[in-house]
Amino acid sequence: MNLSVHSHDVHGQSLTASGLGIHLPDETPLTAIRQAVLDHGVTLLRNVHFDEASFRCFVESLGDKVSYADGSAKVGYGFADILNLDGTHDKEKVITGRGSLPLHTDGILLGTQVDLIILYAADVKGIDEDGATVVCDQLAAWNDMPESLRRPLLDGRLEYLAFERGYFATVPEGWYPISTFRDYGRVRSLNLALPFDGQAKASWDVRVPGLTAEASTAWFAALEQHLTAAPYLYSHRWRTGDLLIIDNQRTLHGRRGLQPLTCRKLLRGQVTFEEIASAPGATLAGE
Ligand SMILES: O=C(O)CCC(=O)C(=O)O
Ligand SMILES: [Fe+2]
């Protein structure tokens, strides 16, 4: 048995063809990950052992942990800081449920700054392609985006409607506008969540102001096709012990739906980096 065959083809190459992401060797110390995710946009480390307490400590080591405990205890079904993406069969739950999730950026509906999303596979059984988390290199996709697709984004606003009130407890009841770009001082990028397809129970909806429903749907379909094109996309097939960290400011992410009899229990943390005090619109050298 030649173990090196397996390890040599997974390390040292990016996770997307566009050059985003890195699969770190198993022996990488946890303290080296923060810099790696800043450098590469996404990191994958396999065979990591965390329980919820040690996962929380690790999340806290990466930045200011996003916590919904005080003042808005009902956000996210009352979770405080670590969300259990447990693939619940409860039909009312979408984000923590079993259906697919369209590409989105975290924090968009609640208006929170989320710099890193930390996902850890506590227990995964019987899944393959299904249940994959997909990550889009949105900066590369934007660079290559045709003018016709860009135009509604350049208009500056899309309108959103939050259905999953148990999760989005604090947002307006009806349609409300959200800026299509955001810049917290580190990266300027698309602030976007795509619509759910017609079959699935939706957590939110989104439309282009001023377009008919048909034209809006057609534009989103073309945008999704562009963003999910092979060069920009990494599709992560989960195994127990996987630690996937995503720079939420450089990417969009989503999920493939789960097959009925599979088990997929992930822990999710989010962190914010300190605000960069300089002028809005400024980006750091190298971005
Ligand atoms: O379940 C997943 O793979 C991603 C879930 C997600 O996007 C989220 O919790 O914000
Ligand atoms: Fe998300």
Image (cartoon, rainbow, N blue to C red):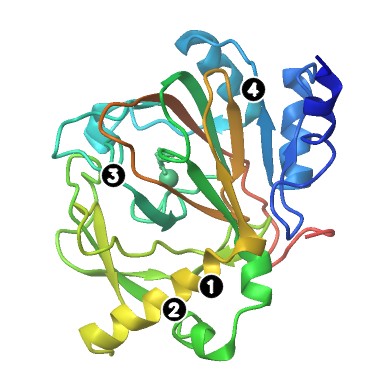
Mark 4 and mark 1 residues within 8 Å of each other at the beta carbon: no
Residues at marks 1 and 2 touching, judged by CB atoms closer than 8 Å: yes
Residue under the image location 67 percent in, 53 percent down:
277
**Mark 4 or mark 1, earlier in chain:** 4
Please name the amino acid that badge 4 sits on: Ser
**Tag shown at residue 130:** none
Secondary structure at badge 2 equals helix
Q: Nearer the viewer, residue 147 or 283?
A: 147
**On residue 99, which mark appears?**
3
N-terminal label among 3 and 4: 4
Residue 145 x %, y %? 61, 79
Answer left or right for 239 relative to 157: right
Q: Three-letter amino acid code at disc 2? A: Ala
Q: Does ligand 2 reach within 8 Å of label 1's beta carbon?
A: no
Secondary structure of the residue carrying tag 4 is helix
Contact, mark 3 vs mark 1 (Cβ under 8 Å): no
Q: Which residue is mark 1?
A: 226
**Which residue occupies 30% across, 30% down?**
87
Q: Nearer the viewer, mark 4 or mark 2?
A: 2
Can you identify the residue that label 4 sits on?
61
Q: Which residue does the numbered mark 2 point to in the structure image? A: 222
Viewer-side residue, 55 vs 172: 55
* Amino acid carrying mark 3 in the image: Gly
Q: Which corner quadrant of the image does residue 216 belong to? A: bottom left
- With respect to residue 103, does 159 lie above or below? below
Q: Is residue 189 visible?
A: yes
Q: How far apart are the two marked residues, 3 and 4, measured between alpha carbons?
A: 31 Å
CB within 8 Å, label 2 to label 3:
no
Q: Is residue 286 left or right of residue 111?
A: right
Residue 72 visible in the displayed image: no
> Dot 2: within a 10 Å radius of its alpha carbon, few (fewer than 14), some, or many (20 or more) residues?
few
